[in-house]
Image: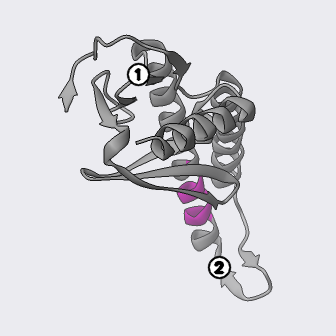
């Protein structure tokens, strides 16, 4: 079931949004990388050897630096989008008597209710240092990203609450 904001009695609620620390670190790091690669590309006067395997001419090295400058700027743009997301959308994960309320997507203020009785399994995964909780339910699969929650403790609390409520269905 999908609605703008679900108006049920909320028993427990958690903010679900990107961390300011991650946003600032990524923006700063990729911003500096973009500047570094732009300066290197603009003043390049020699070739480049990568891992003693790939040999680039002066023009190839300059192109290489501009490509990495562009990619760094793309990540800066993503950081700006995350800043916008954090300021614009109020997303949450909330528990009700009937189910868990989750955002429809990362870029939406809409929410959906996944009823506990429809959740068939929970699974956890680590990918490149990121932890994800998968909720398998009759409508498909929903993913909760640990880094979008305020702390690891609250992430664990969500898992425990879900396990308890699914067990009692």
Crowd tier of the residue under label 2, counting other residues whose Cα lies within 10 Å: few below 14, some 14–19, many 20 or above: some
As measured in the structure, the alpha-carbon distance from the residue carrying label 1 to the one carrying label 2 is 59 Å
Q: Earlier in the sequence, mark 1 or mark 2?
A: 2
Identify the magenta region. Answer: 62-69
Q: Which mark is residue 56?
A: 2
Say if residue 134 shows up in the picture. Answer: yes
At 63% from the left and 39% from the top, the residue drawn is 160
Say if residue 104 shows up in the picture. Answer: no
In the rendered view, does 103 fall on the left or right side of 36? left
Q: Which quarter of the rendered picture does the N terminus lie within?
A: top left
Q: Element at badge 2?
A: strand
Question: Where is residue 79, by image quadrant?
Answer: top right
Query: Height in image: 102 above or below 73?
Result: above
In the rendered view, does 79 fall on the left or right side of 35? left
Q: Which mark is residue 96?
A: 1
User: Looking at this view, is 20 or 157 the one in front?
Assistant: 157
**Principal secondary structure, stretch drawn in magenta:** helix
Q: Where is residue 112 drawn, in percent x and y?
A: 28, 30
Question: Where is residue 146, by image quadrant?
Answer: top right
């Amino acid at each position: 079931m999908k609605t703008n904001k679900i108006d049920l009695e909320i028993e427990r609620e958690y903010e679900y949004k990107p961390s300011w620390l991650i946003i600032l670190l990524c923006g700063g790091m990729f911003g500096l990388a973009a500047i570094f690669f732009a300066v290197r590309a603009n003043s390049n006067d020699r070739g480049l050897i990568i891992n003693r395997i790939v040999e680039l001419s002066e023009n190839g090295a300059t192109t290489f630096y501009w490509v990495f400058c562009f990619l760094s700027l793309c990540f800066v743009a993503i950081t700006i989008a995350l800043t916008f997301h954090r300021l614009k959308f109020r997303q949450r994960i909330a528990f009700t008597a009937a189910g868990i309320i989750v955002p429809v997507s990362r870029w939406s203020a809409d929410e959906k209710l996944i009823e506990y009785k429809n959740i068939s399994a929970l699974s956890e995964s680590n990918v490149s240092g990121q932890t994800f909780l998968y909720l398998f339910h009759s409508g498909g699969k929903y993913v909760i990203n640990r880094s979008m929650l305020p702390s690891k403790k609250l992430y664990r609390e969500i898992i425990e609450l879900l396990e308890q409520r699914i067990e009692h269905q």
